[in-house]
Image (cartoon, rainbow, N blue to C red):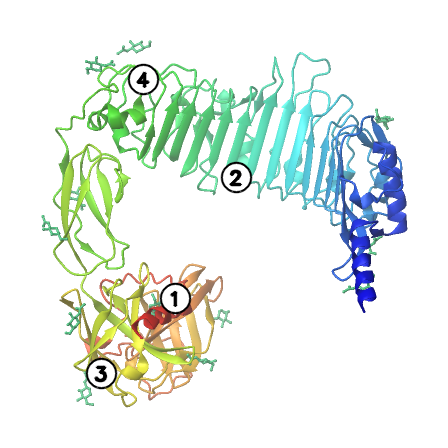
Amino acid sequence: MKIILTLSIFLICFLQLGQSVIDPSQKDVMSDLLFNMYGYSLGLDPCQNLFVICKNINSTSTFQTVTNLNLGTPTQEYVITQDLSPLQNLTVFELYSSIYLSSSFFNYVNKFTKLKEIYLQSFNVTIPDDTIFPASLERFTIYNPSVPLGRATFESNIKNIFINSPLIGFSLPTLINVNPYLEYLSLPVTFYSGFPSNLSQVFTNLLTLQIRVFNDMNENNYKNFSISNNGIFKNLKDLEIEFTDSDNPQEFSIHSFLSNVPVIDYIYIYGQGVTIDPSVGILDLSYIKADNLYFNIDSSSILNNCKGTCIKFPKYSTFDSYYCKFSYDAIDFSNLLRFYDNNNDYEQNLPNIDNAPLLNEISISSSIVVGDIPESYCRINNLFLRNNELNGTVPSCIICLGGNKGGGMVLPNPLLNFNITSEPYCPNFKIDENYTNLLPTDGTGNIIITGTNLGWAEGYGLTPIIANSKLAITIPKGVGTNKNITVTFQNGEQGTFYYSYIPPFIKSYAIIELFGQKFFTINGTGFNYQNSNNITINDQQFTFINALGGGDNDGLTGWYFFDIPNFATESNFTVSALVGGQSSNEVTFYYFNSINITEEKLVLNNTGGSVDINGSFGTNNTSLVSVSINGTNCLVTSYTNSKLTITYPSNQVGDNYVLTLNVGGYAVNLVVEYIEGGETPTPSTTPSTTPSTTPSTTPSITPSTTPSTTPSSTPTQSPGDDGSTSSTLSISFYLITLLLLIQQFI
Ligand SMILES: *[C@@H]1O[C@H](CO)[C@@H](O)[C@H](O)[C@H]1NC(C)=O
Ligand SMILES: *[C@@H]1O[C@H](CO)[C@@H](O)[C@H](O)[C@H]1NC(C)=O
Ligand SMILES: *[C@@H]1O[C@H](CO)[C@@H](O)[C@H](O)[C@H]1NC(C)=O
Ligand SMILES: *[C@@H]1O[C@H](CO)[C@@H](O)[C@H](O)[C@H]1NC(C)=O
Ligand SMILES: *[C@@H]1O[C@H](CO)[C@@H](O)[C@H](O)[C@H]1NC(C)=O
Ligand SMILES: *[C@@H]1O[C@H](CO)[C@@H](O)[C@H](O)[C@H]1NC(C)=O
Ligand SMILES: *[C@@H]1O[C@H](CO)[C@@H](O)[C@H](O)[C@H]1NC(C)=O
Ligand SMILES: *[C@@H]1O[C@H](CO)[C@@H](O)[C@H](O)[C@H]1NC(C)=O
Ligand SMILES: *[C@@H]1O[C@H](CO)[C@@H](O)[C@H](O)[C@H]1NC(C)=O
Ligand SMILES: *[C@@H]1O[C@H](CO)[C@@H](O)[C@H](O)[C@H]1NC(C)=O
Ligand SMILES: *[C@@H]1O[C@H](CO)[C@@H](O)[C@H](O)[C@H]1NC(C)=O
Ligand SMILES: *[C@@H]1O[C@H](CO)[C@@H](O)[C@H](O)[C@H]1NC(C)=O
């Protein structure tokens, strides 16, 4: 026994430390390659070499197979002539500089059926046009190509192609066939390489296009490069054009290209050469559907030569510039959200932002801006104007802060009325008296204050909505009336604000089972989220747990069901709450042990229509039933214990709707998705209208959706309820929390 044990330990050690067991043909080719490239001894295990990764062929086998080659630069240039096709499990193939392939590689490249990535730092062979790349290949990277690059690469299924640092001899092919697979293309262009200008026609699904232009018109055989705007880059998100290494750059007018990129959200332009043709007037990008375009230029001349305003962006765009020299007049600020400009060499005043209602952030630094900081800059929530040549005056909102606090935004600058030692001076500081003072109990509320020279924000709890004129004070969870909070403004002034929490309001109830335990829960607003809630049911008092949920949804409070009186089915009971000394409405609910919708989700036509909902609904009494979708009432056209039919309103396509079924106060929610579909929109869903789809309706059931003879039992339509019950959090999350809370009570 001992011997066997020792033997097997020995064997395990041998297998792990000694030679790996690798396919003989793989071992042969790897040993030959490593010996010739690096002098790696033929006797050694190729899997132990630093540049090679092997893996066990499966989890139960110790047999190994080569998966990655990351061959580092050898001491001498090396051309791989070995037949690598035995490496059939290769997934990553990387050759660092001075290692060349021979063209035979491309004859068998399709045998690497698991190959995901090829990365080559040296490249001097022609890829035959009939090369078939493996379907698994996702990324092909070539540096320093010195030969024409044939069509094969561009007609393959490869998703990502990256080619960089071309050498003399490199050229790009003419492209004819459409390739819908390519998503990412990074190409160099030189004065000798040519360029497939019809990119948008052949690469119909391209997401990212990077072009690095090495063009100098002083070179012999110089050819202009251009991109045709025939065809649309319908998916292009990211365009990056770099003009580098050029004394005498060609002019590339980007105007026509950018007229066909409907969803682009990132544009990067580097270097001299890209222009907006002055004859086209304004480059209007506001047609672009992305509403957060990031437009980034660096050392670029694109805005240098335009006359007047020459570029306009889509709404909520960001403009970001480094080392340029352009006039702010070139830019239409009306849709910009953020404006960043660094090291702009053009001497001018700060941009006029009177027609820039969305602008929220301005950062201009190390630029030759002179003159005043206009009063209009007081409303910018993120303002940064350091290291410029501003030699005029600052507005009162900055003086209010004093040099110590305001300096962080606008100094150093040779300003006339402001320096680091300036004392805060704020005679016009004013808070309007009409601030909001009724707040939710769940901690999501803010006191909104308006006024003059209120500053930005200081410390915890103050957030600018519009700097200096409209701020929000965060109010924590709480209950009750006659509260106050004192905040310190940025200029040092203090303000005390008085507020009350909204009184409790009960909307519905439900009985929910979790872990075999039943809970009686109440939904509504204004509950206590920090402490237990006092709930009165038929004059008897119960202590329910801290409320859960809240925010956009109603809150929920609950308690063990066995505590609650056991009612007869459909008997009525009254519920009210006392929270923080404030009483809720008193509601009359009807008792059901369970109301249950069987469907997991409802899919509705955006034109509106009629739909059945299955479940167990507890009663045949239609007058107790109401159904709403996001707060809009639906007409209930037929109702039984197990199936109800509603006429539902039209809505926009989307999956964040919530249907609420309320049976005598017992409410359950159901996720609703609206899809494109259906016929003519149903004209109306008001209860008074006779439903257009009534054939199956049993005559005995009155199509009334007003369940309430008692107003108090129509809990779903409270004035405070905006209907936006975009409840995405699952109820079980709340119930687990509920259970945890209840544990503490026991
Ligand atoms: C692992 O590979 C060995 C050798 O090819 C084979 O016999 C075995 O069935 C494989 N096991 C699994 C789980 O695939
Ligand atoms: C390649 O891997 C598979 C399992 O993934 C294995 O069965 C096969 O033997 C390996 N081929 C070689 C040559 O190692
Ligand atoms: C590629 O370059 C290597 C190293 O300079 C050279 O040995 C080889 O012949 C070249 N191959 C071709 C096809 O020019
Ligand atoms: C600010 O500097 C500019 C440029 O040097 C100059 O033309 C202007 O007169 C200066 N303004 C003030 C108020 O000094
Ligand atoms: C700052 O400005 C005040 C007047 O506003 C002036 O008296 C003082 O010398 C200035 N300090 C510096 C460091 O320029
Ligand atoms: C207070 O009243 C002023 C003037 O009507 C108004 O502009 C401001 O928005 C109000 N403030 C709040 C917080 O409602
Ligand atoms: C503010 O509320 C606290 C209790 O939180 C109270 O002690 C204080 O007197 C109130 N201040 C004012 C000015 O009402
Ligand atoms: C709840 O009601 C009990 C009994 O009326 C009372 O003692 C207690 O203070 C109340 N709690 C709250 C938070 O209102
Ligand atoms: C009751 O409140 C919980 C927690 O906010 C929520 O998940 C649930 O959808 C609400 N139920 C109804 C019927 O509104
Ligand atoms: C509740 O039920 C009682 C007896 O069943 C009845 O008298 C009373 O009118 C009902 N109240 C409401 C509001 O329906
Ligand atoms: C609702 O009905 C379905 C189907 O009958 C059932 O699986 C589910 O457990 C029921 N849920 C409740 C809370 O009764
Ligand atoms: C949606 O419209 C289609 C086509 O008119 C109809 O067959 C289907 O029943 C409708 N679905 C709903 C839920 O209204």
Locate residue 69 relative to residue 206 in the image: left or right: right
The label nearer to you, 1 versus 3, is: 3
Q: Which mark is residue 264?
A: 2
At 75% across and 49% down in the image, what residue appears? 135
Q: What secondary structure is found at the residue carrying circle 2?
A: loop
Which residue in the rendered view is the most extreme toward the bottom?
568
Counting from the top left corner in percent of width and height, residue 391 is at 29, 14
At 73% across and 36% down in the image, what residue appears? 175
Which of these two is toward me, 632 or 148? 148
At 37% across and 30% down in the image, what residue appears? 333
| Amino acid carrying mark 1 in the image | Val
The answer to which of marks 1 and 3 sits earlier in the sequence is: 3
The answer to which of marks 2 and 4 sits earlier in the sequence is: 2
Which residue position holds label 4?
A: 413
**Separation of residues labelled 4 and 1 (CA atoms):** 55 Å
**Separation of residues labelled 3 and 2 (CA atoms):** 59 Å
Q: Is mark 1 within 8 Å of ligand 9?
A: yes
For ligand 2, the image quadrant comes to bottom right
Which residue position holds label 1?
A: 658
Q: Which mark is residue 317?
A: none
Asked whether residue 224 appears in the rendered view, the answer is yes
